[in-house]
Amino acid sequence: MKAFFFLTILLIISCNQKEQEEKLIVKSPEEIQSETFNREIAEAQEEIDKIIPEDSIYSFVNTALSSNNIFNYCDCLNVLSNWFVDISGDLYFVDQLSKEIDIEKERNFITKQYVASLKFEWKENLIKDKRIIRIPDEINSSQEPISELFKLMEVQDCCFTTVSKPIFFQNFQYAVVEVSYYCGVECAERANYIYERDEKGNWKLIKEYNHIFA
């Protein structure tokens, strides 16, 4: 009986200690925001992956961009497919696209794709004539990022292209993609493209916007 009583007391003390420890773990607003953001991306990815198969993504890039001058400028492709994010907000892309083509019926679907694309990475050997490279995170946080990029280009012996994960309309009639390259100081170019798929399933460029070069 004494042993049972002693074990009960230990259990109560242990539970109280665990409860106190959990109370001490207070997450910062930044940590909560980051967790929420990552959860939203994961949920969007899961939903979009069921609708847009991987082979459709790579087929589009390998065919539609085969004659794109920006895409073909460099031999290396950045593994990350980040869309350009303007200081006005993460949905800058969606707002800009709405000025170029009617997306009202597609806005929610397009927005989910955009969110799902923020951590998308290109896979090795699935894009024709491109060598996949990864730009280390340390470069973005370094005091001289341009200098570090030059060193990386020297090591890889190539400049690099960045291609966003394509955004498709639900009926696959239209696709939107952002393509850019960086080859040094005053040597860069970026543009957004809207493609339309014809009756034979071929992608045709119908509009170019946000074209910037140095």
Image: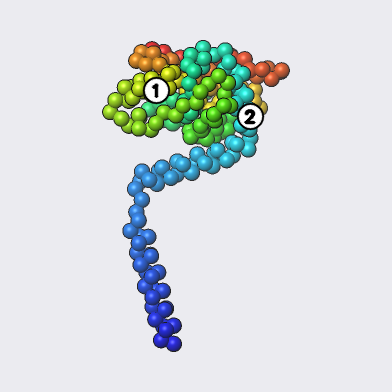
Q: In the image, what residue type sits under mark 2?
A: Asp
Residue underneath mark 1:
155
- Residue 32 seen in the current view: yes
Q: Residue at x 49, y 23 (%)?
A: 77
Q: Nearer the viewer, mark 1 or mark 2?
A: 1
For mark 2, give the secondary structure.
Answer: helix
CB under 8 Å between callouts 1 and 2?
A: no
Label 2 Cα crowd, 10 Å radius (few <14 / some 14-19 / many 20+): few
Q: Is residue 25 above or below residue 146?
A: below
Label 1 Cα crowd, 10 Å radius (few <14 / some 14-19 / many 20+): few
Give the farthest residue toward the right.
Answer: 200
Q: Residue at x 62, y 24 (%)?
A: 59
Q: Nearer the viewer, residue 32 or 130?
A: 130
For mark 1, give the secondary structure.
Answer: helix
How far apart in space, not on screen, are marks 1 and 2 (Cα)? 31 Å
Q: Closer to the N terminus: mark 1 or mark 2?
A: 2
Q: In the rendering, at what x and y percent does residue 138 appear?
A: 35, 32
Q: Residue at x 54, y 42 (%)?
A: 43
Q: Nearer the viewer, residue 13 or 171?
A: 13
- Residue 178 seen in the current view: no
Q: Nearer the viewer, residue 51 or 14?
A: 14
> Which image quadrant is residue 105 in?
top right
Q: Residue at x 44, y 87 (%)?
A: 1
Q: In the rendering, at what x and y percent does residue 184 appear?
A: 37, 16
Q: In the rendering, at what x and y percent does residue 192 appear?
A: 50, 19
Q: Nearer the viewer, residue 48 or 145?
A: 145
Residue underneath mark 2:
55
